[in-house]
Image (cartoon, helix red, strand yellow):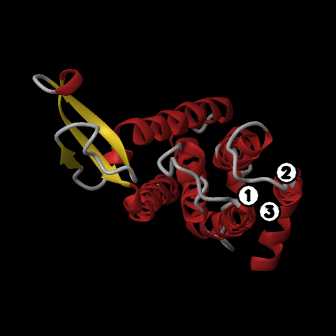
Amino acid sequence: MNLALAQLTWRQHRAVLITGLAWTLLVSGCLLAISDTSSLAGPVETVTIGGPTVLTLLVGLFLAAPLLPREYEQGTYVFAWGQDVTASRWLRLKVGYLLSAVLLMSVLISVLRDLRASPVSRPFSMPMFEGFAPVQVAYVAFAFALGLALGALTRRTLLAMGLTLVGFLVVRAFVAAVCRRFYLPPLHAANLEVMPRDSTAVGVQFGAGPHGIAGVDYQPNDRVPSFQWIETGLFLTLAAGLLVLAWWLVRRREVR
């Protein structure tokens, strides 16, 4: 039964999986072909940011979001979730097969990017921070889990895809703009002149002082690896919670 379900999963989703694999190989080839990775401008920035992001959206929108709604809309869940395989087992096996495949693609791109990247002076910038391999893997897992949960909740393919796109972008933007630089309490300096050079300002207090600045909050750049692991844990936790939610929604329908 596991082999039969694996073959069925491949037949149903091979177009998206082949597209994802082709994109992975294209981005990997570009990363290997770029000779100068010391700059984040031009093609390097495009590959560093765009490559993993396109794969992540492909996974969330076209693989995970339609997974359950297609069964509901076509009525095939009545046959797919029969006596031989329960809905919970069907979901567990399908998620296992698909998520394993897309995570391997993400790991390939992210590891090659890490190997090719050169140190820069702005480690908190988006390309450097989000290019870290575990962070990218966590983004892919979150996008997949979000699409799956919204598909289980709405049971409508287009609605689930639209909500997945909006939800993913909103959460990513909120974390990057509001949460990321405050994973650990910032340090404080009297002004920009005394702030350590190897650090990033995250807040400025205006008042009586040089140039009207009364103080500066900053994060040392050597905290970036810790922050990247914290963000990895955050998105993996969100992904786990969404997978549990999707399983619960499918399970609830199963026992009715």
> Mark 2 falls on what kind of element?
helix
The crowding category of the residue bearing disc 1, from other C-alpha atoms within 10 Å (few below 14, some 14 to 19, many at least 20), is: few
The quarter of the picture where residue 90 lies is bottom right
**Which quarter of the picture shows residue 136?**
bottom right
Identified at 24% across, 50% down, the residue is: 186
Question: Residue 23, which numbered label?
Answer: 2
Q: What amino acid is found at the position of numbered circle 3 in the picture? A: Thr
Residue lying at 38% horizontally and 47% vertically, measured from the top left: 180
Q: Which residue, given by chain and number where applicable, does mark 1 sit on?
A: 79
Check the image and report above or below for 139 versus 110: above
Left or right of 8 in this view: 69: left
Q: CA distance from mark 1 to mark 2?
A: 34 Å
Between residues 48 and 243, which one lies in front from this camera angle?
48
Q: Nearer the viewer, residue 234 or 74?
A: 234
- Identity of the amino acid at label 1? Phe
The residue singled out by tag 3 in the image is 9
Front: mark 3 or 1? 3
Q: Nearer the viewer, residue 12 or 198?
A: 198
Q: Please tell me which residue is depicted at 54% across the width and 39% down the height of the picture.
A: 168
Query: Which of disc 2 and disc 3 is earlier in sequence?
Result: 3
